[in-house]
Amino acid sequence: MATFPSTDWFDAVRKAFNADDAFHGAGGGACSTVMGAKIGRRQFLLTFEGLECSAAREVSEPDLATADFYLDMPYADWRAMIQNIAANGRADLHHTLNTLDLDRPEGLSRSIHGDQYREDLFFRYNQTMQFYFDASARVKTEFAE
Amino acid sequence: MTQNTGTGARPGVGPAGSEPASATPATPPPFDRPNAAVAAAQADAAPVKPPPPRLTWMGITHQWGTRVKPGKHGLRLGDLNVGIYGEVPAVWNDQTRNPRGAVARRGIPPVGYSIRDKADLWADCAADLYEEAIQRRWAPATDVPWATLASLPDDLEAAICQVATELSQYANVDVEAVTHWQHQMAYGYHEVKQFLATVSFDAARHLEAFRKRALANGGGLGLEGPGEVNRMILESRGGWTETVLYLFVLRGLFTQTMLRYLERYATCDAERAIYGNCLEDKARHLTYGVDHLWYSINHQPDQKLITQQLCIIGERVLVRELKDPVLREALSIVFAGGVARAASEGAAVYRKMMRDFVRRYLDVMKWLGVERTAMFPDELAQYLRND
């Protein structure tokens, strides 16, 4: 059992994601990016290299500036997304990263640097990021709040 | 099923029932008959000794001893840019197909490349995008779960088919526009040419996927789109940079935004896979487009103003095309799940889609430093006022 949010939880998802070839085929594949996740007052950075998510670590808020893009939504919405993934085995159409980004006035994906090239990685690797979070269906999760 | 009649088949490789591979045909085809004159000459002639190799070409190189090592992600195209092989000049004067870094042969007739300035096609990310396109490829035949398609109400199926019809047209324009320019690009900028080859292939795949969606669920292709933007893209003769602006940024962002909403309102996993995968491809194309415009603007003194003028022209053509109601109505029906709520619910989602498109377009232009408040069409600006 891993607690969301925590480095342990992101690591557990990382291992599930890396272990299954189904996440690395069509729609997925090699990518190179650092994605941030802002969950309430906590921040995490995930590093994707080649076919793997190679690292996950908790960071301070200013460190999000090093991310190509970061996902930002209230804790309750993160929780709803992860619960939806657990219930369905993957996100339904109301809880995909694409939908969550479209449905928020400020979007889900943001950046501090404003660099279009780096921000567009959210779209270029959208399926891979989705596969990563879909892999959380295989991780027994408890919630901090 | 069409049966192979065996006519014209080579002996031994015909369909079931034809002669087995080991059998000799009664009358050998003409190319198998021994040539009597050749046979006689071979019998009379003394054994011919091949001339000793001269090997004069050996050792002709600009740089030898190169040993590029694969990195963490394999041996990538960009990794090869070492020493003289990584020197990408601002102008490529060689008019032949001489590979960058190879020794030119004298007397090669010119090919006639018209795009020889780096600023007219370059993007620093091209080599990486090429690798990405190769590694993240997908196949509509097998990577789309076609079995998840289910019967839909006629109005919804018709709307999806109409959208698929227009998107397949867009994809065809992508192929034609890219290939029209590609052969005019100097060989020295091979990273860009290689990346654009993947764009053509991506677009061919999109055409395939949308056509398959239209024909796989009881519907069919709908009405041809008005094609004003298509024509503008195909007839943009001011240079590749102009085409990039219209194809990858103006139309590309519009298509990308549409794909995001189509994925949001997909009716099944097959559609979700199509739209999601196409979205990633289109995002890659946009990345090249934006990076190239950035390079072009920052290496040519007048390019920013030229881009602004081209935007004014392109935006007006897009506005004119959007006055055609077909795509708007079809999308509204898709977003509303049927015609009943299309005028209210569906139209509201359509407006939100247009707002997102206009916002992102203006964000990209702002990032490029291209001023887009002057003469910005009110038909597009209105979507921002509806916030």
Image: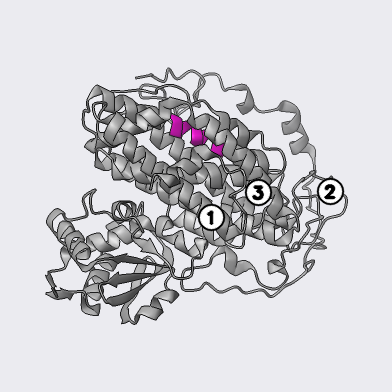
Name the residue that disc number 1 marks: B364
Which amino acid, by three-letter code, is at mark 3? Answer: Gln
**B9 or B98, nearer to the observer:** B98
Image check: A68 left or right of A7? Answer: right
Q: Residue B308, which numbered label?
A: 3
Which x, y percent locates residue B165?
Answer: 42, 28
Q: Which residues are magenta?
A: B166-175
Q: Are marks 3 and 1 on the same chain?
A: yes
Marks 3 and 1, the one that precedes in the sequence: 3
In the displayed structure, A12 sits above or below A132; it is below
Q: Amino acid at mark 2?
A: Ile
Q: In what element is the residue under mark 1?
A: helix
**Residue B330 showing in the rendered view:** yes
Q: Are marks 2 and 1 on the same chain?
A: yes
Is B213 magenta? The answer is no
- The answer to whether residue B225 is above or below residue B251 is above
Chain where mark 2 sits: B
Q: Which residue was labeled with disc 2? A: B108
Q: Is residue B22 visible?
A: no
Q: Quadrant of the N terminus of chain B?
A: top left
Q: Are marks 3 and 1 in contact (CB under 8 Å)?
A: no
Where's residue B296, x and y in %?
Answer: 68, 56
Q: Earlier in the sequence, mark 3 or mark 2?
A: 2
- For the image shown, how many numbered marks are present on the structure? 3
Q: Nearer the viewer, residue B291 or B83?
A: B291
